[in-house]
Image (tube, helix red, strand yellow):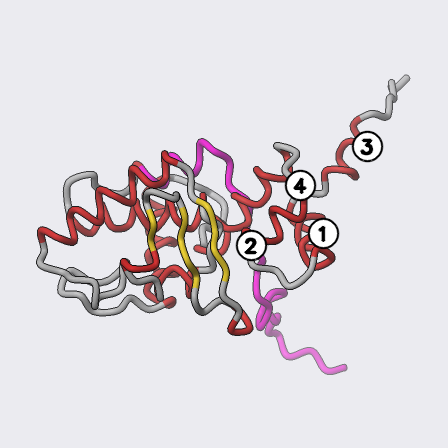
Amino acid sequence: MIATGHKRPWNKGRRLPPEVLTRDEVNALMRACSKRAPTGIRNRALIAVLYRGMLRVSEALLLKPKDLDRRAGTIRVLRGKGGRARTIGLDDGAWAILELWLKCREGLGLSGRHPVFCTLRGGPLSTSYCRGLFTRLGQRAGIEKRVHPHGLRHTGAAELRVEGTDIAVIARQLGHASIATTSRYLDHIVPTAVVTTMRSRTWEAD
């Protein structure tokens, strides 16, 4: 092989997997968003839905106000991966953050015709915009990990696994077609069995 003098980047062409964030890092991400500016209120709500609802960013961006049911605590995802629809649950803490944005939307004159997460004039947000947004928020928050919308989905799923939630429930929340898919997904992002086994071993150096 002839040396060219140029080294090929080891990760060129590879998609880096989203990293799981800690609860403190998620809170730092939230603090990086303004609590007063409409865009900051919207971004905080988007973080809450991606993290606690574990939606794909493409699913979150397609939501319309009619898909939200605060009384039932549910969000209806009409166009999930593979065209599958599902209903997910959202906790009261996340709803409180989302409701601040819904109220803000009303003040901006936005109606049910506009996506839940939209520009201040009601235009759609793109997934590429959100990826760039989360990179900037992560830098502003001082998070050294790669911050990506899908990473919040991973983070929420990892927390459910650690809390001992039934894998079938996690599968339905994530919108996976099978529990086997969820099992592989979770083993990748939070290998609980491996970590527990290895930490239980003892060793003392001479």
Q: CA distance from mark 2 to mark 3?
A: 28 Å
Amino acid type for the residue under numbered disc 3: Met
Residue occupied by mark 4: 166
Q: Earlier in the sequence, mark 4 or mark 3?
A: 4
Q: Earlier in the sequence, mark 4 or mark 2?
A: 4
Q: Looking at this rendering, what residue extends furthest in the bottom direction? A: 2
Residue occupied by mark 3: 198
- The local crowd at label 2, few if under 14, some if 14 to 19, many if 20 or more residues have their Cα within 10 Å, is many
* Residue 25 falls within the magenta-colored stretch: yes
Element type at marker 1? helix
Amino acid type for the residue under numbered disc 4: Asp
Amino acid type for the residue under numbered disc 2: Leu
Q: Nearer the viewer, mark 4 or mark 1?
A: 4
Could you tell me which residue is drawn at 17 percent across and 65 percent down? Answer: 122
- Tag 4 and tag 2, C-beta contact below 8 Å: no
Determine which quarter of the picture holds residue 30: top left
Please report the bounds of the magenta region as a residue range. Answer: 1-30
Residue occupied by mark 2: 174
**Residue 53 on image: x %, y %:** 45, 48
- The local crowd at label 3, few if under 14, some if 14 to 19, many if 20 or more residues have their Cα within 10 Å, is few
Q: CA distance from mark 3 to mark 1?
A: 20 Å
- Tag 2 and tag 3, C-beta contact below 8 Å: no
Amino acid type for the residue under numbered disc 1: Ser
Q: CA distance from mark 2 to mark 1?
A: 12 Å
Q: CA distance from mark 4 to mark 3?
A: 23 Å
Q: CA distance from mark 4 to mark 1?
A: 11 Å
- Tag 4 and tag 1, C-beta contact below 8 Å: no
- The local crowd at label 4, few if under 14, some if 14 to 19, many if 20 or more residues have their Cα within 10 Å, is few
Residue occupied by mark 1: 183
**Residue 22 on image: x %, y %:** 51, 36
Element type at marker 3? helix
